[in-house]
Amino acid sequence: ARCKCNGHASECVTTRSLEGEERQVCKCEHNTAGVDCEQCLPFYNDAPWGRANSTHFHECKACNCNGFSNRCFFDKELFELSGHGGHCLDCAGNRDGPNCERCRDNYFQREDTSCIACNCNEIGSRSLQCNSEGRCQCKPGVTGDKCDRCDNNFYDFGAWGCKPCECYGPGSYNNEPKCDPSSGICQ
């Protein structure tokens, strides 16, 4: 029996099944696989599979996962938008995106390209996402890179932020208004 290779092989090889049957299979080229070279090799899904012909090889192309994954699938919608259809899976290093090109939600990218958890305080932050320097966006009266404490002259750390102390300067120690960060009692 002849083998049909969809234009992706210049030769066929004989293989023997477990039952001892001999069969012709394609020696696939162009990063294709399968008995008849009818699919792309794993990780070669950046372009759609196609039959090769005399004018176009339809070579399967490797996905670009920026070194953070070795698994991908062909994404038709992504291909139509960008001309590249390789959608990466299981990005390592807390990365995300079709090409593992950005950090996952609630992570930020350092200069060395590693992605670090934001660790924003759930109570004191407006969002769990931080900026590019790892600083969180704090609620009113809250401070700290992770928004984990009341700012000076604020007290009662809670879901709405911290309340202003409203201490009177001339009656305070060294004429500087200051209160206890838990109770709000002026000092």
Image (tube, rainbow, N blue to C red):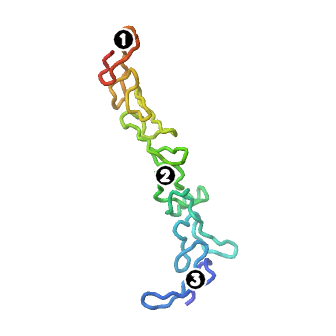
Can you tell which mark lies on residue 95? Answer: 2
Name the spot of residue 61 as percent of width and height, x first: 59, 66
In this image, 84 relative to 143: left or right?
right
Residue placed furthest toward the front: 174
Mark 3 sits on what residue?
4
In the rendered view, would you say 103 is above or below 64? Answer: above
Judging depth in this view, the residue of 109 and 37 nearest the camera is 109
Can you tell which mark lies on residue 172? Answer: 1
Q: Quadrant of residue 59?
A: bottom right
Label 1 neighbour load within 10 Å: few <14, some 14-19, many 20+: some
In the rendered view, would you say 151 is above or below 107? Answer: above
Q: What element does badge 2 sit on?
A: strand
Q: Earlier in the sequence, mark 2 or mark 1?
A: 2
Q: Residue at x 40, y 10 (%)?
A: 175
Task: Name the kind of residue labelled 3 in the image.
Answer: Lys
- The CA span between labels 2 and 1 is 51 Å
Label 2 neighbour load within 10 Å: few <14, some 14-19, many 20+: many
The quadrant of the rendering that contains the N terminus is: bottom right
